[in-house]
Amino acid sequence: NDLGEICRGPCRDSNPAVIKAACALIALVGREVLPPIVKLMGGKAVQPYSAKLVEALLPHLRHRHAAVRVATLDALEHGLLAGAGSSVETLVGWRLVNNVPIAEFYGKGEVRRNWLADLSRDGSLQVRRRFLATLTRWVRQMDGADLYEQEVRLYPYLLNLLVDPDATLRSDALAALTALGEEYLALHDDEWRDKMAYGAADEADRDRRLNIPLPHPFCGRPPLGARVRVRNHFRALIHPIVAEIGCWTAKERCQSAALLEVLLIFVEGSATEFGHMVLPAVAKAAAEADEHELRQRACRCAEVFAHHVDPRSYMPLLIQMSSLDPLNTLSQRLGYFAILPSLLRGMYRVEPATHAASGPTASATPAAHAHAALTMLCGVCGGDGAATSQHAPLRDATRATLLELCALEVSGRLPADADALAFSSARDKLERLPRDVYDSPPPVAGAPFKASLTLGLLLWHGSDPALAAAHDGRTKAAEARRAAGGGDAGVEEAPELGAERKAEVEVAAAWACVERRLVRDAGVLLGAVSKPSDPSTFSPGVAEAASSDDYESVGGGEAQAAAGLLRRFYARLHPLVQEQSHGPAPFASDLLDRIVGSVGQPTASPTASAPAAEYGAVGSAEGGGIGHAPRKVLAVEEVESFEEGETESDGEEDVPISRRR
């Protein structure tokens, strides 16, 4: 007791030098004095004294000097190993849910703080390095009974250091986890000896089939020991991680999403059991329009998840939650469509077991899932698909899905139809897939999958809200001109005619923009153009920006190639888009005819704000899109009389009414 009071007394001082001296004294006691007593009497006999020393050190973990925090960590490292293993619960602020102190009912409860979380994101690299060494030693040397309970509370912070801003620290954290995994296998040699001996070929095959980009410091699959040790705690960790991804603070949400990505890399296919928790949490994070980093991390989580988990275990949930249903909110549907491109990319990067070459080949995942995704976009059983939605963020997500499907088709990742048919006979092994989606005929029946993708692009661009707004503006301008047409003023002087001509220019500009976008997206399907950017970076408004960098210029070769693609499937596409033109995609049929009938290359579209006189005749090539025939506008004005000689003042001279246009 006297020694403990001597050590705790200087901890109450505010001078940094005194605090560091106190930490050095406690570290000496924990290293030289307490271990022999623990060995003689057991850890429980020493725990009341060592726990008080740990509690005295905790406030200094937030000291403004990094050197003081490092000294405090050094003292904690030795003090906690001297029988104070249960103090880990204090370090992480953990308490039983049903254990509420009476003082809290009267507003006198103690504030709980997660000290380890603060250390894992400390601003000093020196502190984080010392934190890694402290955690590693605790996991390696803690008493077996304490480690059995506390390892699950320490491992998340070891894993969190794998996403540290410093690359060297990330590599050191992976090396520490690898070493701890090897020690675990050595400790449980009887359990894992046969599995390692007989499963070496399977492990090598799975190492070869890993085909997704992993963040630093991963250069491939983590070693077996590290995976097994992390997998043991996944069941306990997934619940708080999913809860934190849905919280309201952006910083914690990003950190939890990064930790979830690391966990999915370690647990691989073991995440199947928790797909019903992982997928909704990731979709909710991906639906955030203002958090770009969070959406990126959520999409990477979805890609890793889809690469290791059989699609039959989560596609029924995705289809159910993203369908057009009164119970599915718009934000919920947006989240699932936002992660759908990443899910497709992850599932179709799975290499077949018999493939030994390094080049791209057809995936081992059946093509039925890609067909089902396109069916949701184009519409199931004649219903409206998500591709024709008028919600701007949802349109961005559906366009990203279409482009991902186009890229998969061009790269040859989608298997042949025979593989999809073989899949349908055994698809009920995991989950019963929605038959209205999976058994629906392709959007373009009896044609290659490329034709269905072309239809999806036509529906998406043919339902562009900018076109509808431009046409509505022209209609209103024409009605206003007709309403004012009975006046006595000359037609050339009527302001309504100027507004109508401006509306015509805006319509021509909108058509030119939509045509250039369709040509560029068709280039992705033809393999001539790469995807504009990663689908996870698509933010609301990107698809609506007429001056987007992806569509500023389209060459004549791209226009000719797109026109050739549409001509190839014109006979099959025209009846389908004609039917959709009376519904959710009113401009799809006209867009198809304009591209197919175009000659030459796209030209720049005029801006709607410039004077109408700068564009020449309305509907000319300067105001059109891809070299269309000029359109003529006939303006007719009703007059009361056609009698010769009847004139009206028109500026400096009188103009007969019969000569007015």
Image (spheres, rainbow, N blue to C red):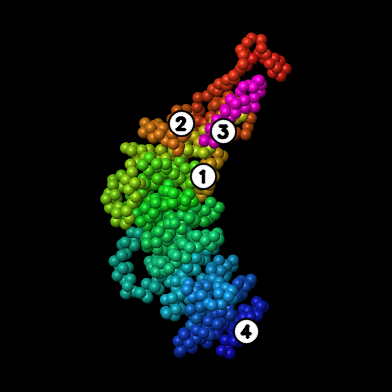
Q: In the rendered view, would you say 518 is above or below 497?
A: below
Identify the residue shown where x is 62% and y is 84%: 9
Left or right: 411 with respect to 6?
left
Residue to which mark 4 is pinned: 9
- Dot 3: element: helix
Q: In the rendered view, would you say 79 is above or below 505?
A: below
- Dot 4: element: helix
- Mark pair 3, 4: CA separation: 79 Å
Q: In the rendered view, would you say 378 is above or below 144?
A: above
- Mark pair 1, 2: CA separation: 22 Å
Q: Which residues are magenta?
A: 467-496
First in sequence: mark 1 or mark 3?
1
First in sequence: mark 4 or mark 2?
4
Q: Is residue 445 visible?
A: yes
- Whether the residues at callouts 3 and 4 have beta carbons within 8 Å, the answer is no
Residue to which mark 2 is pinned: 590
Q: Of helix, strand and loop, which mostly describes the magenta segment?
A: helix
- Dot 1: element: helix
Residue in the foreground of this view, choosing between 395 and 412 = 395
Q: Tell which tag, 2 or 3, sits nearer the viewer.
A: 3
Amino acid carrying label 3: it is Gly
